[in-house]
Image: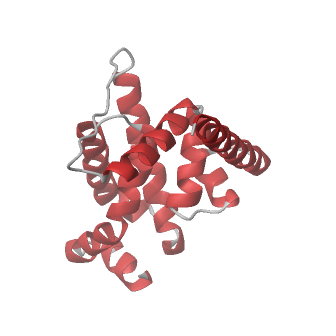
Amino acid sequence: MDILIKKAIKGNSEAFISLIDKHELTMYKTAKAILNNEEDIGDAIQETILSAYKSINNLKNSKYFKTWLTKILINKCNDIVRANKNIVFIEKYTKEEFYEEDIDRRLEFDECFKKLGSEYKLVLSLYYVDGFNAREISEILNENENTIKSRLLRGKKYLKNFLLKNHEEVDKHA
């Protein structure tokens, strides 16, 4: 991967495309944690790719490529959030997308995740989906590492309590 990054920095567009292909899924999942609809997610990823391509020669250390790319993506997502401030999106689920039993679990998790504050959603997504550790997340978000650790703990605790409470409610009515 380091070789691809160095080639991309030197202007090799094929190397850059390969790098983006390797990070496409994690970029999508990160954007999904911040944005509410597929069009905005696509726009954020597209703008991130363009911005990264134009400024890749500013990357000082190739081992931080993923962190650098994620930081650009989060900034693009935040720009879209600000632009959409007064617009409300409702995500639709169809039976074709999920099996019947999976739809309930997915909706339950999404309901819980939506109730989290945006700072928890983003931190949990960067941690679980993208695989960043607390130190890396603190660098990406320009936040104190202890603040990130605290958000991770609180977010995990909230998710656990919410999901356990819902399962207890279901068991009572069964």
Residue 134 placement (x, y as % from top left): 69, 57
* Residue 141: percent from left, percent from top: 59, 45
**Residue pictured at 50% horizontal, 33% vertical:** 114
Q: Could you tell me which quadrant the N terminus lies in?
A: bottom left
Judged left or right of residue 92, residue 134 is: right
Which residue occupies the foreground of this view, 107 or 32? 107
* Residue 165 in the image, given as x and y percentages of width and height: 67, 38
Among all residues in the image, which is located at the extreme bottom?
3
Front position in the image: 108 or 14: 108
What coloring was used for the rendering? secondary structure
Residue 58, horizontal then vertical, whole percent: 43, 60
Residue at 79% x, 48% y is: 146
Q: Quadrant of residue 41?
A: top left
Quadrant of the snapshot with the C terminus: top right
Residue reaching furthest to the top: 86
Query: In screen coordinates, is 61 left or right of 134?
Result: left
- The number of callouts visible is 0
Residue at 53%, 51% in the rendered image = 125
From the viewer's perspective, is residue 166 above or below residue 100?
Answer: above
Vertical comparison of 108 with 156: above or below: above
125 is higher (above) or lower (below) than 130: above
Front-most of 128 and 95? 95
| Residue at x-position 73% and y-position 42% | 154
Specify the quadrant of the image occupied by residue 137: bottom right
Left or right, 154 with respect to 62, comes to right
Give the residue at the far front of this rendering: 174
